[in-house]
Image (cartoon, rainbow, N blue to C red):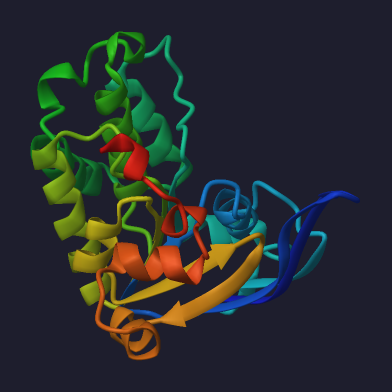
Amino acid sequence: MIEIIELTKIFSEKIIAVDNINLQIKEGKVVGFLGPNGAGKTTTINMIVGLCKPTAGKILIDGMDIREEPEKVKKIIGFVPDDPLLFEKITGISYLKFICDVFEVSIEERRKRGGWLLQAFKLLDAIKDPISTYSHGMRQKLALISALIHNPKILILDEPIVGLDPESASILKKIMKRHASKGNVVFFTTHIMEIAEKICDEIAIIDKGKIIFQGTINELRKIKGDKSLEQLFLEVTKSENEKMDFSFLD
């Protein structure tokens, strides 16, 4: 489980990126983290994985405090940032071997799980090529495989679908659902409401650094009415688009 307690991140007097938020993400759940651009999603995720130090508050991962036991926590996390940084001068297979060494993945598991992932994401033919030759989508696939290869208990993905072809996106969604069904945690951000609506057990919506809703989509519909998630999201975040007059386009 991920437990976020009164978490705050202040970059300056005028920039409060995350404002005293509380969240609980339970085992066996796929939880979508939704919000407008600049709402605080990536900053929150970076604090959860230990890339960014909180100004205040606490983050517990599987009962462990990320600040007190960072190595233990990071060993059970699989993380894909919104802009994965890969070692471009080495081959894909060398990068995967490096990741496996870091997470102490056995040779047998590398071959079994790694082989399946490479085949599923159709990266097997290119895995011996330099990463510098990869397209954006191929780099995203390599980042996803790297996050999944050690079979982490906690899977945290920041906009994981961006850049993927439809087949790979479908495979990833199935992997996410399957991963959670085994009692693991999947926490991911997305701007694609259709994806969140199809695969999320729960959603958390953040706006201007504050959590404004957490629960199931059906629970949100009970509050706001029987509408699409996109409509619900725009209402909850009070999007200006809802008030704009588009008649000039006619």
Q: Residue at x 65, y 58 (%)?
A: 70
Residue 231, x across and y down, in percent: 33, 66
Work out whether 239 lies above or below 138. below
Q: Residue at x 34, y 22 (%)?
A: 94
76 vs 162, left or right, is right
Horizontally, residue 225 falls left or right of residue 41, namely: left
In the rendered image, the vertical position of residue 127 relative to residue 130, given as above or below: below
Q: Position of residue 42 (x, y in %)?
A: 56, 49
> Which residue occupies the foreground of this view, 241 or 88?
241
Quadrant of the rendered image containing residue 134? top left
The quadrant of the rendering that contains the C terminus is top left
Q: Count the labels in the image.
A: 0
Q: Is residue 196 visible?
A: yes
The structure residue drawn at horizontal position 14% and vertical position 59%, both measured from the top left corner, is: 174
Where does residue 165 sit, x and y in percent of width and height? 15, 34
Residue 119, x across and y down, in percent: 9, 36
